[in-house]
Image (tube, helix red, strand yellow):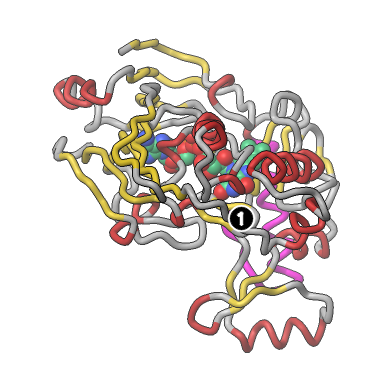
């Protein structure tokens, strides 16, 4: 492992927040958990950081940042119809997608272009264009940070939900994911339920390449290039409200976009609420709401954590005033 003291996190978070941590530990092997445990690192404040693309640092982190960097994709089972792979936490997510493309494996292709590492994918059950990563997760492997006990959780035990899992709830801050197992299909099939994707594909021949290229084109047209503009993707979760509240809102806003949610609830589009509250494309200093996608809070360059915080809190207040709905951040705020 490598240990750096008083380390800058600027290059370790896609928001580009210029903050520091007391100690930065790069794990080069999953077994190094033992040494970290023996050094009592999991007793003091610590945070596990993958690619830092779903985090907003609001200040310096007074503790240890643990960065699992170990890589590897192993084939655990290979039949005529499926391949089961075990992916180490430090693999770049897009390298997992590239592996699938090279080996003609189906299931994850709609998740191309999502920044971050494989170990983080189950944490918020990443999703895009009608697919969630839970659809292909076979199990998640790691160890508990409070007693070093290894765990293996089946997909069902991970309690996946919309941008949610056991790792954001009961096991939050108590475990380090070392490997994620994916069950992938060799049978050619695609998920094209998302209208914009079907439109983009139009009459092109279907293949893994066509689908991923179309998705990357859509993503590039809606999302900022994180090498130029800092952000953490969708800043807010889409709110889920009772049917009765949705009916009342619909009477005032007949164009309200909605999707059916579990238990008879209704999911609304946070981006539309933000746009209606007048925030789409609005900028205060170096912080702003992205003009092409109102769900994305951006750092136009050099924004301080306070500027980003002030902006997103104003968005929450204005949406609440207009719709009586309190938006919840999807991003981890530290
Ligand atoms: C431009 C852009 C577009 C995006 N688009 C999407 C999208 O379409 N869909 C989507 O779902 N998300 C999207 N995201 C959000 C983000 O990319 C995903 O949430 C991604 O999985 C985060 O990976 P990461 O490695 O950067 O995680 P980090 O931000 O480093 O960590 C995220 C969380 O996971 C925890 N964690 C990380 N690694 C481990 C581990 N090994 N063990 C235990 N806990 C761990 C962290 O403690 C933290 O709580 C987007 C972000 C950006 C910047």
Q: Nearer the viewer, residue 204 or 14?
A: 204
Can you identify the residue that label 1 sits on? 190
Would the CB of label 1 be found within 8 Å of ligand 1? no
Q: Main secondary structure of the magenta part?
A: helix
| Residue at 60% across, 39% down | 114
Residue 238 versus residue 149 in the image, above or below: below
Q: Is residue 39 magenta?
A: no
**Can you give x and y, in whole percent of width and height, for residue 52 in the image?**
52, 32
Bounds of the magenta segment: 306-334
Residue 327 seen in this snapshot: yes
Q: Dot 1 surroundings within 10 Å: few (below 14), some, or many (20 or more)?
A: some
| Residue at 50% across, 29% down | 92
**Can you give x and y, in whole percent of width and height, for residue 153 in the image?**
26, 51
| Residue at 58% across, 45% down | 109
| Residue at 36% across, 26% down | 66
Q: Residue 226 lies in what quarter of the image? A: top right
Q: Is residue 326 magenta?
A: yes
Residue 24 versus residue 295 in the image, above or below: above
Which quadrant of the figure contains the N terminus? top left
**Can you give x and y, in whole percent of width and height, for residue 13 in the image?**
56, 28
**Can you give x and y, in whole percent of width and height, for residue 157 in the image?**
28, 59
Q: Is residue 61 left or right of residue 293?
A: left
Q: How many marks?
A: 1
Q: Is residue 173 left or right of residue 50?
A: left
Q: Residue 170 lies in what quarter of the image? A: bottom left
Q: Is residue 151 left or right of residue 119?
A: left
Residue 23 versus residue 218 in the image, above or below: above
Q: Nearer the viewer, residue 256 or 190?
A: 190
Residue 230 versus residue 11 in the image, above or below: below
Q: Nearer the viewer, residue 299 or 215?
A: 215
Residue 333 seen in this snapshot: no
């Amino acid at each position: 492992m490598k240990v750096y003291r008083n380390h800058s996190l600027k290059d370790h978070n896609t928001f580009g927040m210029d903050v520091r941590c007391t100690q930065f530990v790069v794990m080069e092997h999953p077994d190094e958990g033992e040494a970290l445990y023996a050094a009592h690192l999991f007793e003091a404040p610590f945070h596990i950081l993958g690619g830092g693309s779903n985090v907003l640092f609001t200040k310096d982190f007074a503790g240890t940042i643990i960065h699992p960097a170990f890589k590897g994709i192993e084939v655990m089972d290979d039949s005529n119809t499926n391949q089961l792979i075990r992916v180490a936490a430090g693999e770049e997510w897009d390298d997992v997608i590239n592996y699938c493309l090279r080996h003609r494996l189906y299931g994850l292709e709609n998740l191309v272009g999502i920044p971050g590492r494989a170990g983080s994918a189950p944490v918020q059950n990443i999703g895009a264009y009608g697919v969630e990563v839970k659809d292909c997760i076979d199990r998640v492997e790691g160890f508990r940070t409070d007693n070093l006990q290894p765990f293996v959780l089946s997909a069902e035990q991970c309690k996946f939900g919309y941008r949610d899992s056991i790792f954001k709830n009961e096991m939050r801050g108590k475990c380090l994911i070392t490997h994620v197992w994916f069950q992938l299909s060799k049978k050619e099939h695609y998920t094209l339920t998302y209208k914009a994707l079907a439109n983009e594909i139009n009459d092109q021949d279907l293949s893994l390449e066509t689908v991923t290229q179309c998705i990357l084109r859509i993503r590039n047209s809606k999302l900022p290039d994180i090498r130029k503009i800092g952000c953490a993707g969708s800043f807010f979760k889409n709110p889920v409200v009772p049917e009765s509240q949705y009916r009342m809102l619909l009477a005032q806003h007949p164009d309200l976009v909605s999707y059916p949610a579990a238990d008879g609830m209704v999911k609304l589009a946070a981006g539309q609420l933000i746009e209606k509250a007048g925030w789409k494309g609005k900028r205060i200093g170096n912080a702003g709401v992205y003009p092409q996608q109102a769900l994305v809070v951006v750092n136009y360059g050099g924004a301080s954590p306070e500027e980003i915080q002030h902006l997103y809190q104003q968005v929450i207040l204005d949406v609440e005033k207009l719709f009586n709905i309190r938006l919840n951040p999807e991003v981890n705020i530290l």
